[in-house]
Amino acid sequence: MANQKINVNHDLCTGCRMCEQVCSMNYTKDEINPQKSNIRVETDALIGYDRPVVCSQCEGKFCMKACPFEAIKINEKTGAAEVDREECTGCWACIDACPEKAMFKNLEDGVAMKCNLCGGNPQCVKVCTMKAITF
């Protein structure tokens, strides 16, 4: 399977945060909570800049290489590097290793979080009416 990925055009983002909302609903199955989203929108209100931060499924797979517990595995269907929630110990080595800062801490359950491409059907892309996020 070819490496599928989400692409971001920061110039098109309006900061609506619909991507965060749908991602958290998809991740938790019942809660809108940006802290449980695998995509985050960074905002700089002083310069009017919004920037979606999401794993680009980089070729270097720095998160996988950094994980001492091999808790990040490749999904054979999508080619995405995904966190195995059962294996993750919450050491955060993967988060520190990510050059894009696109991995996040779920402090509630102590597991690292990153985009898993929603099984090959990313929901954030569907709700981004500005097309700042594409697949």
Image (tube, rainbow, N blue to C red):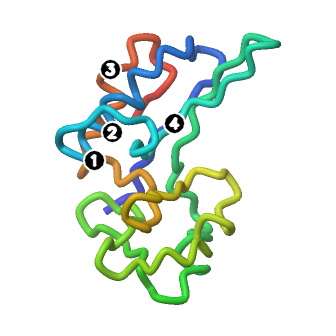
Q: Where is residue 76 in the image (x, y as percent from the top left)?
A: 27, 69
Mark 1 → mark 4, Cα distance in angstroms: 20 Å
Question: In the rendered view of the protein, which quadrant contains the C terminus?
Answer: top left
The disc labelled 2 sits on which kind of residue?
Ser
- Which residue bears the numbered disc 1? 27
First in sequence: mark 2 or mark 4?
4
Amino acid at dot 4: Asn
Q: Nearer the viewer, residue 87 or 115?
A: 87
Residue 22, relative to residue 104: is it above or below?
above
Residue, disc 3: 127
Residue 40 position, x and y percent, is 53, 37
Three-letter residue code for mark 1? Tyr
Q: Is residue 83 left or right of residue 56?
A: left
User: On the image, which quarter does residue 128 sit in?
Assistant: top left
Q: Image point 47% across, 59% down: which residue?
A: 107
Residue 48 falls left or right of residue 12: right
The residue at the point 33 percent across, 37 percent down is 23
